[in-house]
Image: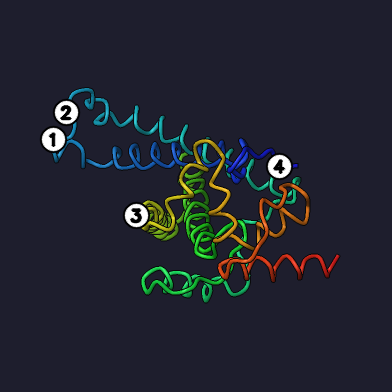
Amino acid sequence: MTKNKKDKILRQTLTNRFVHWTTALSIFLLILTGLGQLPLYTRYNVTKLPGAAWLSNYFTTVNLHYWGAIAIIFVATFHIVTAVIRKEFDIFPRKGDMKESYLIIKAMFTKGKEPPSDKYLAEQRVAYVFIGGSLLLLILTGLIKIYKNLPGVELPNSLLFWNTQLHNLGTVLIILGILGHLVAFLIKENRALLPGMFTGYINHDYVKHRHSIWYAKLLSNREISADESIDSPKDLAFQQNNKQINNSM
């Protein structure tokens, strides 16, 4: 049973928020310390800023980089395991997500009607694949980087070269993914989702009108109760989806 408040619906559980913020902090640490292993901070006088001298210490940044890697591997594993155990696959990609993402983005800019959405918008599921794939690339290439430093291990130079290139590519992709994730919230229609990552709850009416498929499921599962009669044209998508779910039961 979803624990909902008056005029609010629980969208992000404590587990989801833990995964989100642990991932965010781990990625920040990995990027910060990863760049620290290059001469960038010293070259551009970043280390002269108050409290930033440690960024020029290779051993400090590499050790923190390893801790960040441990954290990201742990949280990625935790996320997958808990999703499977709880059968929570709402964020996982679905067939037609690219087309639906296009329609949603088009509607945002043209003020047209969006297709009805489930718990997550199609573009959120696409972003999940992009960021998740980038992290997987970083983890795999990072593990090879660690393995090559073990005593007695010798790997071909060509493998090390391409592994480094792929690790760098993963870094660029994850930075682009994060920027895209943040820019998405500059769009007015998406801002109502922000409270969910802090408190877990988002506005009831927002869910009802923009996530009508999920809203219908919540009603069908009796996780929420009908708040009022539905007679507005904006509720037609919800009404149709709820009818389809009830007929299939």
Whole-angstrom CA distance, mark 4 to mark 2, is 47 Å
* Residue 31 rendering spot, x and y as whole percentages: 36, 43
Can see residue 127? yes
Q: CB under 8 Å between callouts 2 and 3?
A: no
Give the image location of residue 27, x and y in percent.
43, 42
**Closest to the observer, 179 or 112:** 112
- What residue is disc 2 on? 49
Quadrant in the picture for the C terminus: bottom right
Closer to viewer: mark 4 or mark 1: 4
Indicate whether 175 appears above or below 212.
above
Does label 1 or label 3 sit earlier along the sequence? 1
Residue farthest toward the right in the current orientation of the protein: 249
Q: How far apart are marks 1 and 3 (CA)?
A: 32 Å
Snapshot quadrant of residue 44: top left
Amino acid type, label 1: Asn
Query: Which secondary structure, mark 1?
Result: loop
Identify the residue under disc 3. Answer: 186
